[in-house]
Amino acid sequence: MSVWQIGDRVDRFVVEDHLGEGGISRVYKVRHHQLGTVHALKMMALKSRSLTERLLREGRIQANLSHPGVVTVTDIIEHDGFTGLIMEYVKGRSLDLVLGKTGAPPLAESMALFRQVLAGVAAAHDAGVLHRDLKPGNVLLEPQGDGGVAKVTDFGIAKLTLSVDGAHTQQSDLIGTPGYMAPEQADDPTAVDARADVYSLGAVLY
């Protein structure tokens, strides 16, 4: 399993912090060894061809969205047989951690942040991408001035409504998070459209 410690060298990057982990990946704060720039590294925790393909697909989707409301992916690395995504480092916490610690922000602040989330998701929809796992844990909040910046992340189970060659993309193995998932997505995750994301956004706003 890919478990890196602070100070470890991973490809062209040095690990500075461990930011979190999920079932198949770990996220680290890393610094480019030569440039000195700070990034987030999402590294596979297991060696699996299917999961690696999913991660690469996630990277391609986020790299091509290029919107301030979406966490940017800038590169892919391979290290000791593990695949990782180099991403924009967001200095802050996920929305679920904020809600768990301090509760919901005041209404005006909540709406300002939510509009940024809407803009990011709208850009994804305009590009033919359905997120399918919108929830507080996949929204990162970065303090800025008197307010904050909200960025959508983790397009690991996103659906492309049209692929590059025009063929519909099918992916039904992972479908989302039940508490935020539209009922029709539970029935058939490959048949949903933008309305499923709108349902999830409503749950996040609530």
Image: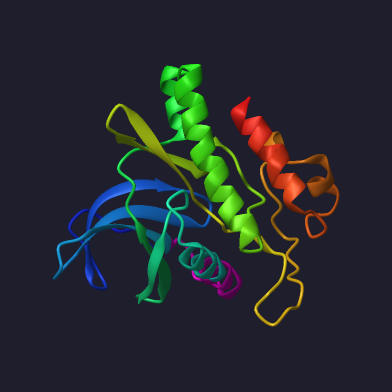
Q: Could you tell me residue 37's position as x and y percent?
A: 20, 61
Residue drawn at 59 percent across, 57 percent down: 124
At x 66% / y 63%, what residue is drawn?
128
Name the one closer to the observer, 111 or 23: 111
Query: Is any part of residue 136 visible from this angle?
Result: yes
As displayed, is residue 192 above or below residue 33? above
Q: Is residue 105 above or below residue 64?
A: above
Q: Is residue 3 magenta?
A: no
Q: Position of residue 64 (x, y in %)?
A: 50, 68
Residue drawn 69% across the image and 45% down it: 197
The quadrant the N terminus occupies is bottom left
Kindly identify the residue that appears in the image at 80 percent across and 46 percent down.
Answer: 186
Q: Position of residue 33 (x, y in %)?
A: 16, 68
Give the colour scheme of this rendering: rainbow
Question: Which span is picked out in magenta?
Answer: 44-56
Query: Magenta stretch: dominant SS?
Result: helix
> Image quadrant for the C terminus?
top right
User: Which residue, as the protein is rendered here, is positioned at the far bottom?
Assistant: 165
Q: How many marks?
A: 0
Nearest the eye: 32 or 129: 129
Residue in front for this viewpoint, 187 or 62 = 62
Relative image position of residue 76 (x, y in whole percent): 40, 72
| Residue 42: quarter of image | bottom left
Is residue 165 positioned above or below 161 on the image? below
134 vs 78, left or right, is right
